[in-house]
Amino acid sequence: MGRITRFSREPADLAGARRLAGQAALPGMVNAHSHAFHRVLRGRAEQRPRPDRDTAMPWREVHDQALQRLTAEDVFDSARMAFLEMLLGGITCVAEFHYLHHQPDGSPAADPNRYSREILRAAHDVGVRIALLKVAYARGDFGGDAASAPPRARTSSTDQFVRECEQLRTFVESEYPADEAWLGVAAHSLGAVPLPIFREIGGYAHSRRLRLHAHVSASAAENAACVAEYGRTPIALLAEHGLIDKRFTAVGAIHLAEDEIKLMGAARASVCVCPVSERSHGFGTAPVEELLAAGAGIALGTDRQVQGGLLENARLLEYELRSRVPTRPGGTDPAAAWWHAATVAGARSLGATTGALEVGRPADFFTVNLFDPALAGAAPENLLAAIVLGLERRAIREVWVGARPIITGGRHAFQGPIVGRFADLQKRLWGPAGP
């Protein structure tokens, strides 16, 4: 894909340049945590739980229904819809945390990577870069056995998982350019992946120099269960076994002790926060400023597709922090901090070459209409703050990936068919009286 070769003010170059009158260009954003098939769940699991139930219970019930119904083609259509929405919001690269591996009844597919290939096909079809994170899921939770894992996500054995990863890695490297699609691996969580398996997966990732991601410390209950089984909280346990380094990303990381924050910083590891999704579940907020001060990276993700944008997540994070600590250190520029999280830090979490408009990097960028009501009157010195904290999606006009126009005039070339097929999928999946 096309890369930036130089920046120029030479008259000859300017004469041949395409002018984007009234627009500003920014680097494409990087979504560091996505579950694309969750797009089918939007609006169907948002009722408040009863006091006697788990806060995530309504969502889990609908999620499990979707797991029992989605075909490979449905996975393709839901992923195309999710990726389209991301591109319309200025996201040009996504990490897909993919744990749907088997057929609807839980039996193995003839091709064990069939559903992974559908995700890759959807990303290529829509035009977004993708780090496909193949997820291990060996049990339902701490103390459980293999039978407690969701049938469609269940990892039969570590050896089998590694073989499938190698097959998928070979396929990706032979079929796609290296910076368009690449493989990473993930353990769903320590609750879902016992430590011995987690260590083997981590060893495989290390041997292939692949990124390793995992949900970590989303709740106090998770930490307590981990202590009960292993005598350590998740971050302390993983660090003790050499699994936290610069290629590791903890997703969530809401309940961290001070020493765990220091561990993450010393390792130069990353944390991906998904504020909109985490708030929808009633979870807390990761100690992002403390993690940044310690040297860890902070990336942003959309997680379960409650909505498909990163800037909405950045705003929610900033205002949540303000509500917790109204008087934060003077001179802090939240727009710059969260823009860095949505671009450079996200790219680092995934091992992507994107995230900045620099010579040698891919020409991934989006433009905004400076005369859109959301941005009108913004001066150059406060334009980034206006974009990060106030941009409306309608103001995004062009999105380019690898020097190719993907969104033009605020619309994707295949937007009609993608949206239409997704609407048909929702009708088939849920029916007029569905959840």
Image (tube, grey):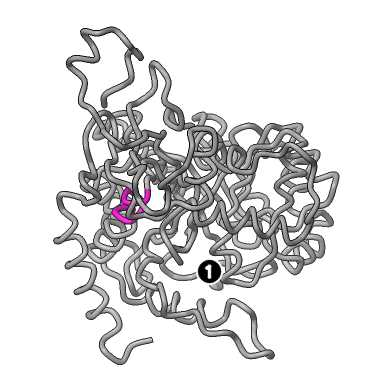
Q: Label 1: which residue?
A: 149
Horizontal and vertical percent for residue 188? 56, 56
Residue pictured at 77% horizontal, 60% vertical: 324
The quadrant where residue 382 appears: top right
Relative to 195, is 180 above or below? above
- Could you tell me the amino acid type at mark 1? Ala
Comparing 147 with 3, the one in front is: 3
Q: Is residue 56 left or right of residue 378?
A: right
Horizontal and vertical percent for residue 306? 46, 67
Query: In the image as oriented, which residue stretches furthest toward the front?
Result: 377
> Would residue 351 be seen by someone viewing this image from the given angle?
yes
Dot 1 falls on a residue whose secondary structure is loop
Relative to 189, is 129 above or below? above
Comparing 256 with 310, the one in front is: 310
The C terminus: image quadrant: bottom left
Q: Is residue 211 left or right of residue 17?
A: right
Task: Identify the magenta region.
Answer: 83-89
Comparing 339 with 38, the one in front is: 339
Horizontal and vertical percent for residue 46? 50, 79
Residue pictured at 20% horizontal, 50% vertical: 412
Relative to 420, is 432 above or below? below
Q: Is residue 114 left or right of residue 50?
A: left
Residue pictured at 57% horizontal, 41% vertical: 341
Q: Is residue 25 magenta?
A: no
Horizontal and vertical percent for residue 6? 34, 12
Residue pictured at 35% horizontal, 26% vertical: 362
The N terminus: image quadrant: top left
Q: Main secondary structure of the magenta part?
A: helix
Comparing 32 with 68, the one in front is: 32
